[in-house]
């Protein structure tokens, strides 16, 4: 299912995205915000494996910038738990000249709204390394609130740093309104 907002479109990742995935994850500025998730070097085989072995407890989307149709990253829900009605959310976005334009916040809002309205979840959470204040601000703009901080939880640049755990809830005012309002449409 494609999800479309004012700034981005979320669509299924495709094999044609592989070269751009590898290029973007090779950018130290992009990889720095991801903690231990982005290993180096990240090659075409790694990207193809990710695309070809989807996890049944996840929903992944490529992010396209509507301004020019460019692939600018990936976002998704993982660890979808229908019993406890929650899921983890993640994103990476690049190159850096695409940052600070609201693309990440809107991608987050679209994915979270999908989790609440289509999967019936009550909570979506994310871990953000303390070294990524830009990422934290983006999810806070999308209605996430700090629940706690995990000390020395994730490796960044060869050292353990804290990870902030932030969550969005179905009854948050951003998500309690109809999907046809400010944030996007389902296609």
Image (cartoon, grey):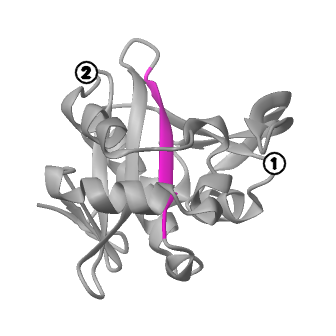
- Considering depth in this image, is 66 or 120 the residue closer to the camera? 66
- Considering depth in this image, is 178 or 13 the residue closer to the camera? 13
> Callout 2: few (<14), some (14-19), or many (20+) C-alpha neighbours within 10 Å?
few
Task: Locate residue 18, reporting x and y percent.
Answer: 26, 53
Above or below, 170 against 72 in this view is above
- Considering depth in this image, is 186 or 35 the residue closer to the camera? 35
Task: Locate residue 184, reporting x and y percent.
Answer: 28, 69
Residue under pointer 1: 130
Name the residue: 61% across, 57% down: 139
Task: Locate residue 61, reporting x and y percent.
Answer: 28, 50
Q: Is residue 66 left or right of residue 186?
A: right
Residue 37, label in figure: none
Magenta segment: 85-94
Extreme residue in the top direction: 83
Q: Are marks 1 and 2 in contact (CB under 8 Å)?
A: no
Residue under pointer 2: 56
Is residue 11 among what the camera can see? yes
- Considering depth in this image, is 36 or 101 the residue closer to the camera? 36
Q: Secondary structure at mark 1?
A: loop
Res. 5 image quadrant:
bottom left
Name the residue: 84% across, 37% down: 162
Q: Main secondary structure of the magenta part?
A: strand
């Amino acid at each position: 299912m494609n999800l479309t907002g004012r700034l981005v479109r979320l669509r299924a990742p495709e094999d044609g995205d592989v070269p751009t995935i590898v290029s973007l994850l090779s950018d130290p500025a992009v990889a720095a915000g991801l903690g231990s998730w982005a290993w180096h070097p990240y090659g075409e085989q790694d990207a193809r494996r990710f695309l070809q072995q989807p996890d049944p407890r996840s929903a992944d989307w490529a992010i396209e910038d509507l301004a020019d149709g460019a692939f600018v990253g990936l976002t998704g829900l993982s660890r979808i738990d229908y019993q406890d009605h929650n899921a983890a959310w993640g994103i990476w976005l690049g190159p850096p000249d695409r940052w600070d334009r609201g693309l990440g916040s809107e991608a987050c809002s679209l994915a979270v709204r999908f989790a609440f309205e289509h999967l019936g979840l009550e909570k979506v959470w994310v871990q953000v390394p303390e070294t990524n204040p830009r990422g934290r601000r983006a999810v806070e703009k999308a209605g996430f609130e700090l629940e706690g901080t995990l000390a020395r939880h994730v490796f960044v640049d060869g050292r353990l740093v804290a990870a902030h755990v932030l969550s969005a809830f179905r009854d948050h005012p951003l998500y309690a309104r109809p999907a046809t309002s400010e944030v996007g449409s389902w296609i």
